[in-house]
Image (spheres, rainbow, N blue to C red):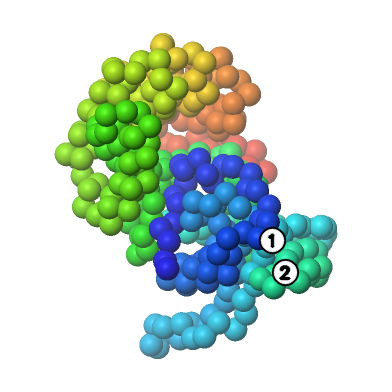
Amino acid sequence: MIHPIVGLGHSILRQVAKPVEKDYPGLKELVADMYETMYAADGVGLAAPQINLPIRLVVVGFRPYDEKTETYGEPTEEHTLINPEIVAFGEKKDWFNEGCLSVPDIHEDVLRPTTIRLRWYDEEWNLHDEEIDGLFARVAQHEVDHLEGKVFTDRLSNLKRTMIKRKLNDVVSGRVRTAYRMLKMFVMLATAAVLTACGPSREERVAQIEEMEDSVFESPAALDTNVAEELTTLYMAFADKYPADSLTPAYLMKAAETQAGILHTERAIALYDRVVDNYPDFGDVPMCLFLKGNAYEQNEQFDEARRTYEEFLEKYPDHYMAPSTRQMLPMIGMSAEEMLDYIMAHASDTLIAGV
Ligand code: ZN
């Protein structure tokens, strides 16, 4: 069975995955599904969190590609990595252009050691402890990162990340097209919102989420402005009905993201404000402030964007988005050419090398 692939922006990609137990139910079938899912998406590696499972399971597979027929041959190499652990890194490092099924359309050079010592269990629970190199070592490191809640774009320089920020935002908000089925933020928002609208009790709504998921995943046509508006209404209905519910600030934030996703930035900004003003204990308040800056920027209200980012930096100087925000701040409102000039004029040699 082919599983939909989780896109950047989904919180599961930021979790540390749990070890796989020996009696994990349906492990063999799951492994087979993962190979099928990976090959269907033309991937060479897939970690379980990418199909929405928070466990330390990875598949790696290489198939020869025939340029003439544009088809793949039978796999020449496959590795099922259960509870993989990088025991040691080799000293030599190399750049390699990486991509990720969870971060479509973005390919960037990443520096990593060329050899590693990897310890893992295979499907038969045989323990391997091997020095590996080449593409296997590269893919294994990328996938083990997934198990630690990291994606390859985290390993880019702040400046590089700033320059691809818009593309990353597109991925997060589901504004990308892929040949494979993705579990996009937007679709997930839809599922959650539909849920809030039906069922008399909160518990029943939660039970309905899972049931609704499949049907929403099956209809990509659901991703239009009308649905976004409908979703927002539902989120807000929930928020109005249960203002003190623990889910409410998250729903309001999702409503804001949904609105930003369809470029209704003023409404998005008002919703981010509502979260920041009313739910100071909500963990994503810093992110809401940051995204509010994004929304202003998207709306070309550059002074407001600057002010919002400054407020964000002042309040949350240690937030993980703070370093790139600091670097980006002077470039707000610049055209692409101005930005490049600015970078050439201000970046140190090291930073330019990173680009
Ligand atoms: Zn990946």
Vertical order, 48 against 308 (above or below): below
- Residue at 22%, 48% (x, y): give it: 222
- Residue at 76%, 57% (x, y): give it: 86
Residue 176 image position (x, y, % from top left) = 34, 52
- Residue at 62%, 80% (x, y): give it: 77
The residue furthest bottom is 68
Q: Nearer the viewer, residue 276 or 351?
A: 276
Which residue is identified by label 1?
A: 22
Mark 2–mark 1 distance (CA, rounded to whole Å):
8 Å
Amino acid under label 1?
Lys
- In the figure, residue 1 lies in which quadrant? bottom left
The local secondary structure at tag 2 comes to loop
- In the figure, residue 235 lies in which quadrant? top left
Residue 50 image position (x, y, % from top left) = 51, 54
Q: Residues within 10 Å of mark 1 (few under 14, many from 20)?
A: few
- Numbered disc total: 2
Q: Are marks 2 and 1 in contact (CB under 8 Å)?
A: yes
Q: Residues within 10 Å of mark 2 (few under 14, many from 20)?
A: few
Residue 348 image position (x, y, % from top left) = 65, 38
Vertical order, 68 against 35 (above or below): below
- In the figure, residue 70 lies in which quadrant? bottom left
Q: Viewed as shown, does residue 228 lie left or right of 352?
A: left
Q: Nearer the viewer, residue 127 or 109?
A: 127
Q: Nearer the viewer, residue 166 or 320?
A: 320
Q: Is residue 239 visible?
A: yes
The local secondary structure at tag 1 comes to loop
Which residue is identified by label 2?
A: 125
Q: Viewed as shown, does residue 131 lie left or right of 210?
A: right
